[in-house]
Image: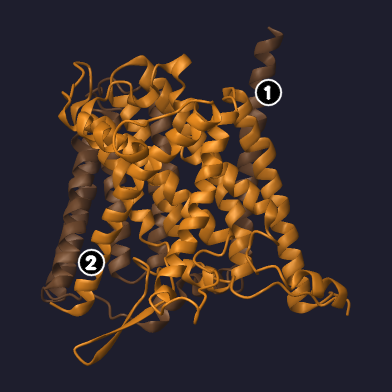
Chain colours: A orange, B brown
Amino acid sequence: MSIELIISLVKANIVLAVLLTNTILLIWFERKVVAGMQSRVGPDRAGPFGILQTLADAIKLLLKEQILPSKADRAMYLLAPLIALVPSFLIFMIIPLGPDITVEWQNALYTIPLVGADLNVGVLYFLALSSIAVYSVVLAGWSSGSKYPLLGGVRASAQMISYEAAMGLALVPVILYSGSLSLVDIVNSQSGNLSSSIPILNTIVSFIPKWNVFPQFVAFGIFFIAAVAEVNRAPFDLVEAEQELVGGFHTEYSGFRFAMFFLAEYINMFNMCAITATFFLGGWLGPTFEGILPPIFSVIMPIIWLGVKTFLLLFVFVWIRATLPRLRYDQLMELGWKRMIPLSLVWLILSAIVLGLREFGLPWS
Amino acid sequence: MVDLILFFIPASLIIIGALIVVFAKNPVHNAMGLVMTLVSIAIIYITLNATFVAMVQMLVYAGAVMTLFLFVIMMIGVDKKEQSSESIKGQTFLVSGVFLILISLLSYVAINSEFKWDLWFDAVEFAIEGTPQLVAGTLFTAWIFPFEIISILLIVATAAAIALAYDSKRKKNDA
């Protein structure tokens, strides 16, 4: 077996392990944070600070009976949870976790990029897979053979199509700024500090890192709102609105199949935050404190920085869920089509003009 | 060997998906068969080093077009049972004719090349690094005129759709 194949297999297993462990941590984190915001205690029985609560819940779900509704469409009913899970794992493959590391093994040097796959069309890959994820919700809703899941499924397809457009449009200015569709290049383009041709402004902005969030703050806002809508989180969780639709598209699912939907939702949330950090917050970039900390930290620090940024964004996700009430359906559609898409188009044109002026100068000079 | 496996898995998925589209009774199953075919074609594009085309195929056909298909099927509720009668006169005859032509064409090509074909393109540095740049470069220079014409056509179609929907809604309110 070639060394490249072994590296790829190890990477795939690491992705699986990281995402599953992370989900356990993330669900506990969300419950604790929401509990804290609502003056409750939250889970505190299983393990230290209740950190093993999710594990206990997962074991409970695995042991439960799996019900197949009598009116369900069998093939699609069984397929839907799988379609939910597979894209969520695949998206994580393109997120760069750090710079290339060089390993010496049997007198040969190997360069291992800390990314599952550096695609030259990474942004498109991300958008394509998140559009595939819509099928799981739609099919789960339709195949259950019941009213509420069907309504949830139809709502989901309309919502996810609408917000995907805004999300894609918000990413275009970032691609223009970075000049690449590859996520590794997008992170690399954000290294260094901001600079300005005006001397006074330059002294002020030269302390700010060159992350895309500073020149592209509008795109960041649009992308983050669309990301919340894309993973169907509050305040955009009309897909599973308890008061109207019981449980939405997964009403009829139980046991392990329900757990798969649950897992996919949290992995998607984590992916979205990691992708937002990569596009706008400089990804793994950050001080590595070389010379102060032992040399191993030059490898670990980038991963820690990405984790810190991701969990900050996840905290905002949870914060939004704990504070904002759910939008009405027509308000949701109006926000998507009448506000966010026009705003992102205007912002795209503005950034293109600014970049053009910087590249080629004024048209009459 | 690897290239053969990488070709036959998606190729057989394409054929199975196409058969589902034709023979399944339920429209939702038909639509999902089509999705399977489209995604497998994207995989074939990736093995040919056309990653950009593959991603656009996934994004546009498997992602957007088929989601709308499913949405329409569910909204207008045709997901009942298929009518077995012909909707176009002489449908079966026409389809078998086209099928025969296709089969003879394929066998002609296969015999002509003495049953040898290249399934795997070499990893050209150029193709891997620059597909989006290459496509964009050609599209926005040599093909800019057809590109603009298509964009005007799409705007006209969108405006027409909005006009039709708007008019009928107002009439209903008046009545």
- Write the residue at 23% across / 77% down: A4
Q: Mark 1: which secondary structure? A: helix
Q: Are marks 2 and 1 in contact (CB under 8 Å)?
A: no
Same chain for the residues at labels 2 and 1, yes or no?
Answer: no
Q: Write down the residue under mark 2.
A: A10
Crowding around mark 1 (Cα neighbors within 10 Å: few <14, some 14 to 19, many 20+) is few
Dot 2: within a 10 Å radius of its alpha carbon, few (fewer than 14), some, or many (20 or more) residues? few
Task: Say the numbered circle drawn on residue B167.
Answer: 1
Task: Name which residue lies at 27% across and 60% down.
Answer: A14
Nearer to us of marks 2 and 1 is 2
Judge whether A334 appears above or below A365 on screen: above
Percent coordinates x, y for residue B137 in the rendering: 56, 74
The x, y position of residue A44, in whole percent, is 36, 32
Report whether residue B76 is seen: no
- Residue A32: % across, % down: 45, 35
Amino acid type, mark 2: Val
- The reply to whether residue A262 is visible in this rendering is yes
Quadrant in the rendering for residue A10 = bottom left
Gap in Å between the C-alphas at discs 2 and 1? 60 Å
Residue at 50% from the left image edge and 56% from the top image edge? A308
- Between residue A137 and residue A14, name the one nearer to us: A14
Residue at 37% over, 30% down: A43
From the image, which quarter does the C terminus of chain A lie in?
bottom right
Q: Is residue A83 left or right of residue A291?
A: left
Please state which amino acid type lies under the numbered disc 1.
Answer: Asp
Q: Nearer the viewer, residue A345 or B18?
A: A345
Which mark, by number, is residue B4? none
**Which chain is disc 1 placed on?**
B
Is B32 above or below relative to A239?
below
Q: Chain of mark 2?
A: A
